[in-house]
Amino acid sequence: MWPLMVTSLFVRCQRVAASPLNLRLCRTLNSPPENQQTVQTLYDLSVDIQKVRKLKGWVLHQSPAYAEEISIILKNMGASESIVANILGVYPEAVLCHPEQMQTQMELWRTVCQNKKDLVGIIEKFPASFFTPSSDHENQRQNIDYFQSLKLNKRIITKLMACAPQSFSRPVEENKAMVHALQEAYLELGGDEANMKIWLQKLMSQNPFALLKPPELLRQNIMFLRDRGFTSAELLHLISKLKGFVTELNPGGMCQSLAYSQGIMGCSEKELRDIVFNCPALLYYPETVLAERFAALLKAGISMSQIMETPTVLELTTQIVNYRIQQLKTFGYDVRSGSLEALNGTKKNFEMSYEKLQIRKERPLFNPVAPLKGDD
């Protein structure tokens, strides 16, 4: 009885141990082998094959593939061998695009970006935007024609195609609806029609994804802010200063952020509107982010009144705030008693303020070389 039990257990263990191996063998046998022509061509182009296998190995198993043809198209556009290798290494799916379709795509993109060198740079940075399905080409063509009819700068159109290709792959009617909603809102809020094209270009340049939102959301957000007491002029300022993020917001999220901000600052509705007018970011930061940033500033000894005077300091992350406070402290600048403007701003602006403090510290109080004034 005992030998029988041992034998049975041994057989069962063998089956359990062998199962994963058998499954792996089955998967290997069922999957197609790598396309050796693709692998060899990519290798000859100095593409990192191991990286491709690790991240997008499925591409190497596809057939037909056009690695050599795509590389020739890129080289004919002026791409160097290293750029071709970089493009196909980052986005190997490009080799699955039919050469004729990519030739059509290149001609399409050159209607808005005629400089080959610039176009190669865009493809290198946004390969997924260029190597799109041929089914999208007609929508792309119609959208390009539409945006050109708006007299938009070609650089803006190119940026939209590169950063937000979804805007060009979808039906042109959807973009027309959102652009019309933006134009309508701009004029209703008192915008000057003569400057509307410049305003629209700036908005889309700052946030290329603004067009992907439904027009109804834009109207809801404007209605919500109007109900909170913002004037038409203030709303126009907010829409412009939010860099298109007004289309990313929603009334529910804004309501929570404003309620938290007003609660922690203990300000009136009018004061809150003034603060938001100077720092529109308060509209889209969630409560958790605001709580962390308020806490970091207060922990550093900064008063709530200082924050209310310079609310844009809330746009800085906690890590940046702490770093800048320490940097300023080395030159004897105490943010607890000084203006937060020294702490505020972009990295470039802060570095300029920091350099001024450094010069002020290193400069002697008097010039030892200058002659002393004597009595007349």
Image: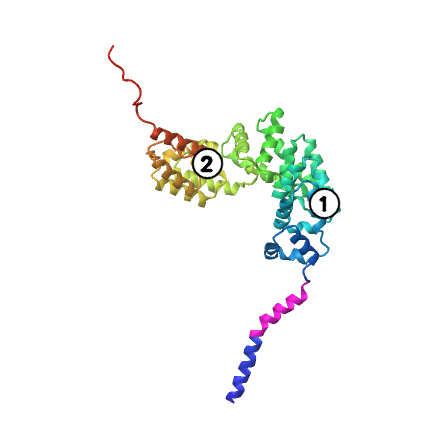
- The magenta segment: 17-32
Circles 2 and 1, Cβ within 8 Å, touching? The answer is no
Could you say whether the residue bearing mark 1 is in a helix, strand or loop? Answer: helix
Mark 2: amino acid: Lys
Q: Disc 2 versus disc 1: distance between alpha carbons? A: 41 Å
Label 1: few (<14), some (14–19) or many (≥20) C-alpha neighbours in 10 Å: many
Q: Residue 205: x and y, percent?
A: 59, 35
Toward the left, the furthest residue is 375
10 Å crowding of disc 2: few (<14), some (14-19), many (20+): few
Amino acid found under the numbered disc labelled 1: Met
State the image coordinates of residue 217 (x, y, percent, origin top left). Answer: 58, 40
- Front residue of 308/224: it is 308
Quarter of the rendering occupied by the C terminus: top left
Query: Which residue lies under the disc numbered 1?
Result: 102
Q: Is residue 30 magenta?
A: yes
Residue 333 placement: quadrant: top left
- Residue holding disc 2: 347
Of residues 45 and 132, the one drawn nearer to the viewer in this rendering: 45
Residue at the farthest top position:
376
Front position in the image: 329 or 374: 374
